[in-house]
Amino acid sequence: MPYVKKDNRKELQTTLDDLVSILHNLEDKSGNTSRAGNLNYIVTYLINEMYPVNKYSELNDAVGFLECCKLELYRRRVGPYEDVAIKNNGDMSNYPAINTKKKSFFKRIFNIGG
């Protein structure tokens, strides 16, 4: 989860805002979007700096945090976007209709929430 203490967030935010501004300027200068390449460079650089030792636990932590970033993006932005698209365009015919009155899959399997 990308939720850090407010004091840490304050310290990081100015640098992050500056970096975003630089990235937008690079896109404007080039006339084409190289957003993915620029972001890949930044993330790779940060990972190499923060996890410099080729040791399983270090590399596992790096891969784990990347996976959590991906999942957080999906949970917060992609999932809701897909839900709106389903409402607007209809669901695929081979997916069972979601019945909100029934317990969710996880609640049924793990007996969560009564």
Image (cartoon, rainbow, N blue to C red):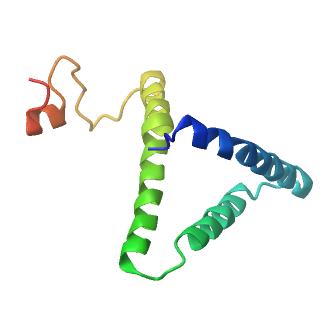
Give x and y (percent) for residue 57. 36, 73
Q: Which residue of the protein is positioned furthest toward the front in this rendering?
A: 7
Q: Which residue sits furthest bottom?
A: 54
Task: Please tell me whether residue 47 is drawn above or below residue 6 in the rendered image.
Answer: below
State the residue in front, 3 or 109. 3
The part of the image, by quadrant, that contains residue 13 is top right
Q: Quadrant of residue 102?
A: top left
32 or 111, which lies in front?
A: 111
- Residues 39 and 4: in front is 4
Quarter of the image with the C terminus is top left
- Expressed as whole percent of the image width and height from the top left, the position of residue 47 reads 56, 68
In depth, the one of 38 and 5 nearer the eye is 5
Residue at image point 41% right, 81% down? 55
Give above or below for 36 relative to 107.
below
Which of the 4 quarters of the picture holds residue 83?
A: top left
Q: Name the residue: 91% across, 54% down.
A: 29
Left or right, 97 with reference to 87: left
Q: Quadrant of the N terminus?
A: top left
